[in-house]
Amino acid sequence: MEKILYRSTNRKSDLVTFKEAVLKGQPSDYGLFIPLEIPSIKKDEIDSFKNKQYYEIAFTVLSKFLKDDINPEDLFKIVKNSYNFEVPLAKIEGNLYLLYLDRGPTFSFKDFAARFMAGIMEYYAKQDNLKLTVLVATSGDTGGAIANAFYEKENIKVVVIFPKDEITEIQRKQMTTLGENIISIALKGKFDDCQNLVKIAFNDPDLKNLTSANSINIARLLPQSTYYFYAFSRLNYEKVCFSVPSGNFGNLMGGVIAKKMGLPVEKFIVAVNENDEFPNFLKTGIYNPIIPPKKCISNAMNVGHPSNLARLIDLYGGWIYDERNKDGKIIKYGILKEKPDMESLKNDFISFSITDEEVAETIKKYYLKYKTLLDPHGAVGICAYEKANLNYPVISIETAHPGKFPEVIEKILGFEPEIPKDLKNLISKKEKYTILENSYKELKDFLLDLK
Ligand SMILES: *Cc1c(COP(=O)(O)O)cnc(C)c1O
């Protein structure tokens, strides 16, 4: 047994096992967990993926990390159960392909991470006979993916807190119509208030076995490397590039891990919306986070200081962190303490900021020319692909179903996109949620009453 251990990007916390990293979520020095070493996959093993199903490829890739942490039969079950939906890869034109990660139960690529993490947490909760409460604040989409992924998982309750008047009806119904172990709270406040109350709860010693499911959890990162191997295996090329619509860079980091494991990726196109801190950084070596972020129609990518940037910079030899006061409150964002190897960053990444106007033009063009209906996030990826103009095959990632954005699409194309049946069915489902004031005492009493 030689388990892979995990260290913190802030270099001040001890090494932990995968299980500890999953249950802890974040190291106590406020860094992010990252594997001490990245295992490799041999070329002939990658070649053998050609004839394999998605879940088989995902199992092989994840086994490289987890074979000494979780017994293979259990890992196989978790993976097979997580990836029980289609992952189409379509040729659009010439050397451009589109990888559809929007066919999971909540029609967003977040399902790939959330479903695996839910399986892993259930496994550990049962192993130690723990009753866990997963507490998440959501501004919309993450809550739905988490709620759906944890639905009916044993030994786990999920409490999602969303800003009462700031999410769409569909987003709300993806959380509030499930029932069973999924409990929803509409907070009379903003997303920041939700996040703030959740943070206080995590530091409250009266509340036991609270777990976070946020996007920086290592159990959400590792599974996001699997679709890169899958996409590569469906094509016949020596090397490919990926165009990745990016916000917090979790998707991108999955790809970077795949590349470090041995997947022949020539370049990643880091496609961002008008929040252009990363392309500027690549160009100048100076990092200026955008706080608060700009609001664009690709709203899941409205991030001006990507949380996973700390992992990316770390893997390229640098160190970036947020300065905090002794209560843990951030007082200065994104301090670049050690510069990464800019040469190799520029070698492996090319990055473009895409305006909302360009997104609209891209959606129009690809619909009229190729009968391909893109969502606003996928369109950022495609537009960046056009700007990159690379001499390699490019796989661009579609991260959400266009049917989730009927108003945006209607405005651009003049008609409503087809809405997936399961999304439509939500409309008539019965909702259950509790409305709370923006007060920690109310939340705490609510959580204590759950027991
Ligand atoms: C979360 C999300 C993104 C951004 O992914 P990151 O991993 O945060 O970079 C892009 N598109 C959609 C639809 C998303 O939900």
Image (spheres, rainbow, N blue to C red):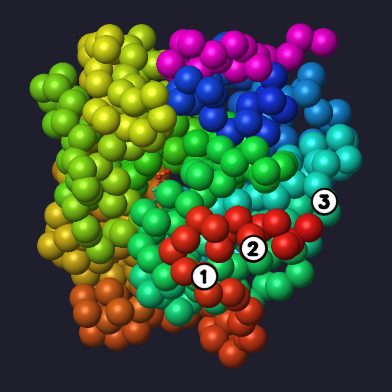
Q: Which residue is mark 3?
A: 155
**Visible residue check, residue 379:** yes
- Measured as percent of width and height from the top left, residue 338 is found at 27, 9
Residue on which disc 2 sits: 446
Estimate the spatial distance between the alpha carbons at disc 1 and disc 3, rounded to whole Å: 25 Å
Dominant secondary-structure state across the stretch colored magenta:
loop
x then y, percent, for residue 189: 38, 66
Label 3, secondary structure: give it.
loop
Magenta part of the protein: which range?
1-16
Quarter of the image with the N terminus in it: top right
Q: Residue furthest front?
A: 441
Q: Which mark is residue 265?
A: none
Q: Residue at x 25, y 17 (%)?
A: 336
Check contact, mark 2 vs mark 1: CB within 8 A.
yes
Residue type at tag 1: Leu
Mark pair 2, 1: CA separation: 9 Å
> Which quadrant would residue 173 be assigned to in this image?
bottom right
Count residues near mark 3 (Cα–Cα under 10 Å), then give few for <14, some for 14-19, many for 20+: some
Q: Which residue is mark 1?
A: 436
Q: Secondary structure at mark 2?
A: helix
Magenta stretch encompasses residue 15:
yes
Q: Nearer the viewer, residue 67 or 201?
A: 201
Report the side of 348 relative to 77 (left or right).
Answer: left
Residue 316: say if magenta: no
In the rendered image, the quadrant that contains the C terminus is bottom right
In which image quadrant can residue 42 be found? top right
Give the mark nearest the N terminus, 1 or 3: 3
